[in-house]
Each structure stands twice: as C-alpha cells, then as structure tokens.
Image (tube, grey):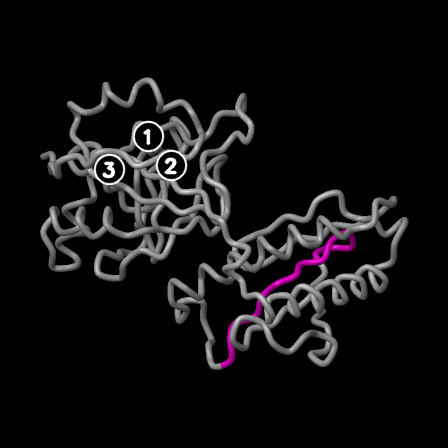
Amino acid sequence: MTFPSEKIPEKILAGANFELRPLGDRAILLRLTLPHGKTSPAQLGPAERYDRMLAARLVAVFLQDRVPAEAGWPQEFVPGYDNVLAPFDPAFISRQTFCEWLLGQLAEVIAGWELGGLRDVANPRRHRLPVIYGGQRGPDLEKVAARNGLSPEEVIKIHSEAEYSVYLVGFAPGFAYLGALPPSIDAPRLERPRPAVPGGTVAIAAGLTGVYPLASQPGGWNLLGYTPFVLFDPAQDPPVRFLPGDRVTFYPITETDLPRFQAEKFSLAPLGEQPEGQVEVRS
C-alpha cells in the first residue's frame, strides 16, 4: 500500500518523495522515491546518493527524538540506504494512527530541510584505511584493469584517490556498502561467487566498493587487495568500524608496512590521517 500523494509532502531532495509501505502487520517502511525524471538508482550521481542516505539517517534520528514513550510505539527507528524501518505493535496502536503520526513528523522535518538544508546536520566520521593491492591479496586487480583498459597501477590510483560514503551496513556484521565507485574502474559481480573470501579483503562490484569483515565468508565481488584493520568486534561499542554516513578513503601500502599497523588495527575508532604508502602491485 502506498499512501495517496496528496497526503505526503511534495518537496524533498529536488523532487523525490516519501512513500509509506507496510512490512507485514508490525512495521512501516518510509522510503524515498526517485527524483522526478529518474527511473533507476543507477541514474543518481554520487552527491544525490549521499544526500538520500543522509536524509534517511536524519529522519530516523528525528523520529527517535519525537516518538511517544508509550506502549506499542517504536523503541528504535532503523535507517537503511534510502529508507527507514518503523516498527510498531498493533495490539496498542493502529496502523492508521501510526501512519498519520509519521506523516505529520515528515512534514516537520522536511520544512526544516527547506530552511536549513541537509548538510547543516551532517558531521560524518572519516576513516582512512591502508590497503595492499594485487597479488594473492587482490587476485582480480589485473582483470579489472584489463576490462577498463587501464594498468593495475591506474586502478589503484583511481580507487585510492576517491572518497566513499557508507550507504548502509549489512550482508555480514560490519560489511559496509561504500559508494560511489568511480565508473572508470567499475566491474560487475562475478558470475560464480567465491565460497570463501578472507577477512579484510577490499573488493568492488556494480558501482560500489567494500571490505569483507569476517575471517571467511562467501563473496561475489572483484577482489583488489587487503587491509589489516578489523571491521567487526562484538566486544566493542559500537561493534563495527563503519556507520551509515561515514566517509572512507584508502591508501596503498606494501607487505613490509604491515607491522606498523599492529598496535592500532583492532581499535574500531575512526582513523586519522596516515602517511602515504608506496604503490606496489604484487604478482
């Protein structure tokens, strides 16, 4: 079910809109529609994608601050890439009442955006991770380079000079979907996923990049390299390195550089600026 458009605020992110859809009988999904004239998320630029992710995060925080502390109302609003999950208990509150409340809150937050803009509330954490590119650490680097008519060194340069936004965290504990990947080094997912990918492996696919967080997990992305930094630790708070809205960059190092990261690789706190490593393509 989608609510009639006249009940939803008309202006959000240059023509995009929110639609409310039930997920079963105990949750509502608030989802940003595509801007006018756009038919696919692939048509969105990096700035648009980041603003949509930021909008979802802001709405979740806004709703969390406003929700009544009463039985049946959400204890937590969960932001996704361009949506917010709003759970409720129908034993205490009707879907109609809950949706009317949600629409009223959306009207207020959008009015605030029109006055102050999205970026006024943005304060992203920044991460800078070292990566050993190529060789056994990144067995798909040369294939990605050949596909795009580049040398491996050019792929490393392009991948490590871009800044990526954390769109969402999912798939595996601590796995962050980072974008947007520069189109000049993009590659599709593998036709046959690998049954096991080592933890710390940096990979790309379909306009995104990411780091596999666990010691061994299946994966269908193209493997470019390896970072020694831990991405998930259930004993820490929060237990993940990346959160939605964070910004991430990578820089190349060599195998001989690994010992100098031993002391800090287990901390999940955002990393400050690190000295540049030398580009070395291992074979």
Q: Amino acid at mark 2?
A: Tyr
- Identify the residue at horizontal 17%, vertical 50% (top origin): 155
Question: Which of the two residues, 179 or 274, is positioned nearer the viewer here?
Answer: 274
Q: Secondary structure at mark 1?
A: strand
Is residue 216 on the magenta stretch? no
Q: CA distance from mark 1 to mark 3?
A: 10 Å
Which amino acid, by three-letter code, is at mark 1? Answer: Pro
The secondary element bearing badge 3 is classed as strand
Earlier sequence position, callout 1 versus callout 3: 1
Magenta span covers which residues? 23-36
Count of numbered circles on the image: 3
Q: Which residue is mark 1?
A: 198
Q: Measuring 46% from the left and 29% from the top, which residue is drawn there?
A: 232
Give coordinates of residue 227: x percent, y percent.
29, 32
Say which quarter of the image contains residue 136: top left
Marks 3/2 in contact by CB < 8 Å: the verdict is no
Q: Quick check: 68 left or right of 213?
A: right
| Residue for badge 2 | 212
User: What residue do we see at 33% from left, 34% from top?
Assistant: 197
Q: Residue at x 63, y 48 (%)?
A: 78
Whole-percent x, y for residue 31 in the image: 61, 63
Question: Vertically, is 176 above or below 121?
Answer: above
To which residue does mark 3 refer?
Answer: 225
114 w.r.t. 161: above or below: below
Using the numbered discs, state the Cα–Cα distance from disc 2 to disc 1 in whole angstroms: 7 Å
Q: Image quadrant for the N terminus?
A: bottom right
